Every structure is written in structure tokens, then in C-alpha cells.
Amino acid sequence: MTRFGLFVPQGRVDAATLRAIAQAAERSGFHSLWVYDHLYNYPSADHPEVLEAFTLMSLLVGWTESIRVGTLVLCDAYRNPALTAKMAATLDVLSGGRLEFGYGAGWHEQEYRGYGYTFPPAPTRIALMEEGLTIIKGLWSGAPTTFPGTQFQIAEAICRPTPVQQPHPPITIGGGGEKLLLRAVARHADVWNYFPIPLADYERKRAVLHAHCADIGRDPATLDQSLMVPLATAAREKAVRDQLEAARARGGVWSYDDQLVQGTPDIVGPRLRDYQRRGVSLFILVLPDPTDLRQIEFIAQSILPELVD
């Protein structure tokens, strides 16, 4: 089944606007709402105002009834993983089982150092992410859990109530590092998330991931694929160009032309279908103006019907 998610803005946005976005997405048939886990200066260095991920997710589930809510992705270092497990289980319980749990190794060095976290090399961060996920999944079982890790240690810890979703909320890990990160995806994730890079490159990453699955005896068919898609679309090409011009001024994902999907629906649809044929079942959209409710409705009417099963 193919589904669509939508990124929610996290800058200077008032609660009424965020609620309107969440409810418009739910009415329009979107599968999920997504947030990132950053503390400041994201998506660009001159963007200091960022809403915290867990607080925002709690409001989103309270404003909606059925749409799912997730993160791309929670940073392992920003919260003790045992506390993360407890917070996520609580959110899953109170939302009636609507949590999508994205988890990652972190990368924003300025945030780390600014908030007093050490910033080790990438291999160490990935190893710590795997420690964190081991702790989190252990606690979600509801059984007393002990883990003597190199960075994180817990002793007979209990996380109850356990999540509504069993055995646990879907775990998403994003990234394409072929030696360590994709190996961690094969070991721990239910969903692999990546970007709409050129198809040949995407196929290579997917093949590496499947090889890691084979190494541990995992069937790759048990691993779903999602794609974070910066999408600029409109009925006319000029409107698409205008969207892109405004978005590029804000930086972030809009600075990478090879990761954008742009054009009128007759161009965008086949581009997304290329990834659909390669196993992508969830497209998580980043819009040039995420507060534009008309754009959400336009995409729901012109893009979703062509791809949603």
C-alpha cells in the first residue's frame, strides 16, 4: 500500500496554524504528519527558532483523530534512550497507537556542542544509536530491562504502560552510509528512509541494504521503504518556479537540486512512480510553504489519487 506523509513546519508558527495544517492533512487523506528533531539553526544557520519535537507531536495527536505522527528522526544523543522509550510509549498509548518512531545517530555538530553534548565521530554515534535502540526495544517489552552499554546503562528498568502497537511502534532509520548505517537499518529498523537521489544511486543503496539483511538472515521484504521528498508542484510551471525560488532562499533541503521533485503533476507523478516500483511505500513530503493549506489540498487532489493503492 502506498501512502503519503507531510512534514509540519517547526519555526515561528502559531498553534492555530499548526492545528489547521494537521487537520487539513487528515481531511485530505494523508497517512502521517512528521517533524524533525533539531534544537536551533535548522534548516539554516540563520534560523534559530525551532519547536521541540516531542512537545509538538503531543499537540498534533491531540488535534487529530486518526492520522499518524512521526519523527525524521529523533537524535539518540539529545535524550537518554530510556527516557525516550518512556516518552514514546506514553505518546503511543495516548494517541491510540499512532506513533511512527524515527531514530538516528545525529549529525548537527553545532547543536551538539551548543547544548553541551559531546560530538564523537560518525562510527561512534552510530554505535551509540544501536545501543539506544537496544534499550528502547527492551523497555517497550514491559519486562524489567538491564543493559550495560558503553555509553548508556540501565538496571532492571521498567517502561509501563507499554506501547499500544505490538511488538512496538514502527522504527524508521534514515540514511545511506553503506558500511555502518545501512547495517544498522538491517539490524534494527522496520522502515528505511532516504532521499529521491538518482535512480541508479538509489538502487545501489537498496542493494547494499539487502546484502546487509542477507548477512544477518533477514528477509528484505520485512523492511519497508520511505522517501523524504522536497516537492514543488502546481498546475502551471511558472507557479512551480516561483515556489522553488522562495524555498531556495531558505536553504536546507531546497539547496540540493538532485534531491528535489518538481514540476506539474504529469511530471511529478511518473517520478514518484519510479521509486514506488523500487519498493517505496511511503512518500513524506516537504513543501516549499508548509503553511499553505491550498497546496496540501492540491496535492491531495492531483498527486495522491494517482499513486495511493
Image: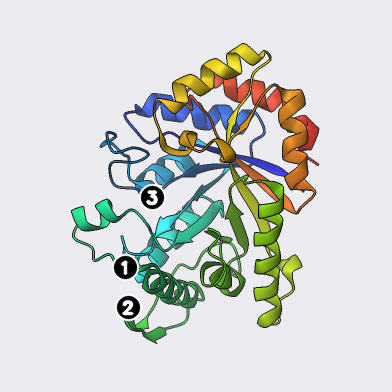
Disc 3 target residue: 37
* Residue at the (46%, 54%) spot, across then down: 73
Which comes sooner in the sequence, label 3 or label 1? 3
* Residue at the (56%, 51%) spot, across then down: 98
Q: Quadrant of the C terminus?
A: top right
The kind of residue tagged 1 is Asn
Q: In the depicted view, which residue is nearer to us: 158 or 205? A: 205
* Residue at the (53%, 58%) spot, across then down: 175
* Residue at the (32%, 40%) spot, across then down: 51
Q: In the depicted view, which residue is nearer to us: 304 or 241? A: 241
Q: Which mark is residue 163?
A: none
Q: Indicate the position of residue 105 as horizontal and vertical percent values.
A: 41, 63
Question: Taking 302 as reference, is 55 above or below it?
Answer: below
- Answer yes or no: do the residues labelled 3 and 1 have beta carbons within 8 Å? no
Image position of 1 (left or right of 182): right
Which comes sooner in the sequence, label 3 or label 2? 3
The kind of residue tagged 2 is Phe
Q: Is residue 149 visible?
A: yes
Q: Indicate the position of residue 13 as horizontal and vertical percent values.
A: 35, 28
Question: Taking 45 as reference, is 178 above or below it?
Answer: below
**Distance CA(mark 3)–CA(mark 1):** 14 Å
Question: Taking 33 as reference, is 204 above or below it?
Answer: below
Disc 1 target residue: 80
For label 1, the SS is: loop
**Distance CA(mark 3)–CA(mark 2):** 20 Å
Image position of 16 (left or right of 172): left
For the image, the number of numbered tags is: 3
- Answer yes or no: do the residues labelled 1 and 2 have beta carbons within 8 Å? yes
